[in-house]
Amino acid sequence: QPRSRGLGDVYKRQIWKEIIKEGKEIELFDNVDARILANFCRYQALFEDEAVKIFPDKKKLDMYGKQALSYAEKLGLTPTARARLVVKRANALNDDDEQDSMMA
């Protein structure tokens, strides 16, 4: 049975709220990430909407899944991306410590 129009927007909002909540807990996002996050939510919602169809279009599933994964990587939502972020933050802290010790 076809979904009512606008349900994709509901999915996008649900995904947005979940990701924002989780991201705030680990200080994952800044204001620059809003557009990237919006695109991630869009493709994730399209993927989920297609996946629940009785006869999903495999090409669309593949395309939406790849797009969502690409944005997830950019946002640090995958384990690999989060590991890179941890290393980046640790290096930044070390650089700050070195600068502080040089100023003292």
Image (cartoon, rainbow, N blue to C red):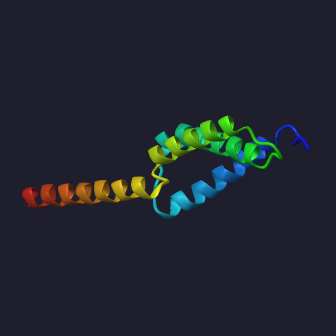
- Residue 85, position in %: x, y? 36, 54
Residue 41: quadrant of the picture: top right
Of residue 64 and residue 76, the one placed in the foreground of this image is 64
Q: Is residue 80 above or below residue 30?
A: below
> Is 54 displayed left or right of 95 in the figure?
right
Residue 63: quadrant of the picture: top right
- Residue 61, position in %: x, y? 66, 41
Instruction: Check the picture and name the quadrant holding the C terminus.
Output: bottom left
Seen from this angle, which residue lies furthest right? 1
Q: Is residue 23 above or below residue 5?
A: below
Q: Residue at x 27, y 60 (%)?
A: 90
Of residue 88 and residue 32, the one placed in the foreground of this image is 88
Seen from this angle, which residue lies furthest bottom? 25
- Residue 8, position in %: x, y? 76, 42
Q: Residue at x 83, y 47 (%)?
A: 54
> Is 83 displayed left or right of 8 in the figure?
left
> Is 5 displayed left or right of 63 in the figure?
right
- Residue 80, position in %: x, y? 40, 55
The total of numbered circles placed on residues is 0
> Is 6 displayed left or right of 102 in the figure?
right
Instruction: Check the picture and name the quadrant holding the N terminus.
Output: top right
Of residue 59 and residue 100, the one placed in the foreground of this image is 59
Q: Residue at x 49, y 53 (%)?
A: 77
